[in-house]
Image (tube, rainbow, N blue to C red):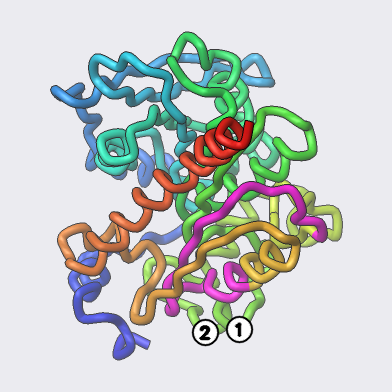
Amino acid sequence: MINRVNPEFLPGLEAFQDFEFKVENLPAMRTAMDELKQPLASTETVEIFDKVILGVDENDIRIRIYKPAHQTTVLPALLWIHGGGYILGGINENDPLCVQVVETSNCVVVSVDYRLAPEHPYPAPLEDCYSALTWLANHAEELQVDAHKIGVAGASAGGGLTAGLTLLARDRAYPSVCFQMPLYPMINEGNNTPSANEVKEGMVWNQKTNEFGWTCYLGELHGTANVPIYAAPARAEDYRNLPYTYTCVGQLDPFRDETIMYVTKLAQAGVDVEFHLYPGAYHGFDMLNPQSEVAQQVVKEYVNAIKIGLGRVTAGVEQIEEAK
């Protein structure tokens, strides 16, 4: 499979350190990863600050808010959810991308530092994300945000939480989500698709590591028939009334087939969806090769998709007003 990797993505793959996934190793892995990602400070164009909100379990949840400096108008907003297999990652993970989204898409971004498994299995991580989403909607006026123009996005496990969160918000009838961007999402706990069976080892994330992540996230639910659709959105049978969706996946990603099936079901349910399949790309190829020409173009597509997704509501309102 290494021979099929796009040459632009080989440096990231060669530099990636394969981890030995054991529960007892997770704290040290998290610390090491966090030390590599120092938080960004506010710039001339983007104001960045942290806040602690209260979660559904009366737990503290740290969120990071990115706003255009000297913001004077009401803007759309995006909730960003970091990845890490439900077991790793943190709020420092995607600072540069969140800043780029604010600068290019002209919106407010809120990133959520949800609890991690296995210490906090499902539904804790998802409920933390829901708490952040509801906080964002409830504080729209304070943040100068339009509560009818809120999107949700994330990559890998963050993509899985994005897909689960939009289902949850739909079924709880609050808040209103106008756009979702679950990038190469982790949504099928079965871990038995053809692409999962193709990528059994290496390649950043594979069938073996995927099994570990799901085992940690689902806890006692793992291996049962009782896994909720909000934990594993590939299990859902009704995708109607979900928001406009943008997603992508690499052809060498174990999540390839579950993403393709997800896109197919969204389209069949009448959801507008844009999908990209990248040949020669493994899991997380864009984040591991930020200097590559292809990855930079892919990130531009993400940012543009956010701008379009959050702008669709505006276009609809303007058309109604013109019709009057």
Mark 2–mark 1 contact, CB under 8 Å? yes
- Report helix, strand or loop for mark 1: helix
Instruction: From the viewer's perspective, tell me whether residue 130 is left or right of residue 270.
Output: left
Residue 45 image point, x, y percent: 18, 26
Please tell me how crowded label 1 is: few (under 14), some (14-19), or many (20+) other residues with Cα within 10 Å.
few
Instruction: Specify the label residue 198 is tagged with.
Output: 2
Residue 242 located within the stretch drawn in magenta? yes
Quarter holding the C terminus?
A: top right
Of residues 14 and 62, the one nearer the viewer is 62
Under mark 2, the amino acid is: Glu
Query: As displayed, is residue 70 above or below residue 271?
Result: above
Report how far apart the C-alphas of labels 2 and 1 lie in the structure: 6 Å
Residue visible at 41% across and 61% down?
Answer: 20
Residue 1: give x, y in percent of width and height: 37, 88
Which element carries disc 2, helix, strand or loop?
helix
Where residue 194 is drawn, which disc sits there? 1
Tell me where residue 152 appears, x and y as whole percent.
53, 40
Q: Which mark is residue 136?
A: none
Q: Provide the residue span drawn in magenta.
A: 237-260
